Image (cartoon, helix red, strand yellow):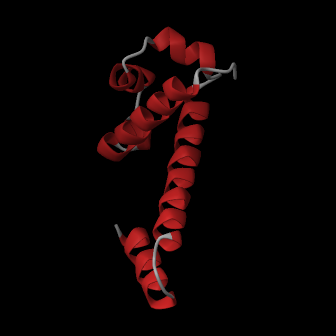
Amino acid sequence: MRTAPPDRLVAILAAACAAICEQGADAVRLQDVATRAGVSRALLHYHFSSRAEVLRRAYEHADAEADRLVAVAVATAPGPRERLDALLETHLL
């Protein structure tokens, strides 16, 4: 994969995640991701070697974002009980 500006890559991966949620991974086409991200399909091919790589990276992006949200929720909770509540609520949302 070639490097893309971080904000463009995040937009592409977020678009892929949204398409997966809406359509299911088996139905997602690269054109769906490109349209949602506001980029050309050619740009996807420039940055990703395959549809499988786009999907894999989208799942990694979603996992990292979930970890980030949990870390923020737990770090901002004032006590142990609140940290546990925040952890559970974040995972259940």
Q: Residue at x 61, y 13 (%)?
A: 46
Position of 47 compared to 37: left or right? right
Q: Where is residue 86 in the image (x, y as percent from the top left)?
A: 42, 76
Which one is nearer the viewer's eye here, 45 or 13?
13
Q: Which residue is drawn at 30% across and 43% down?
A: 22
Vertical comparison of 51 with 55: above or below: above
Vertical side of 36 occupied by 84: above or below: below
**Image point (52%, 40%), residue name:** 58
How many callouts does the rendering have? 0
**Residue 52: where, in percent of width, then height?**
58, 33
Give the side of residue 46 with respect to residue 39, left or right.
Answer: right
Question: Front-most of 37 and 45?
Answer: 37
Location of the C terminus (image quadrant): bottom left
Q: Which residue is drawn at 57% across and 52% down?
A: 64
Q: Where is residue 33 in the image (x, y as percent from the top left)?
A: 40, 26
Choose top left, top right, bottom left or bottom right for residue 85: bottom left
Relative depth, front residue between 24 and 89: 89
Q: Decide: is 69 above or below 30.
A: below
Q: Quadrant of the N terminus?
A: top right
Residue 68 appears left or right of 82:
right
Toward the left, the furthest residue is 22
Compared to residue 36, the image places residue 74 above or below, namely: below
Seen as rendered, the residue at the extreme front is: 78
The spot of residue 7 in percent (x, y) is: 51, 27
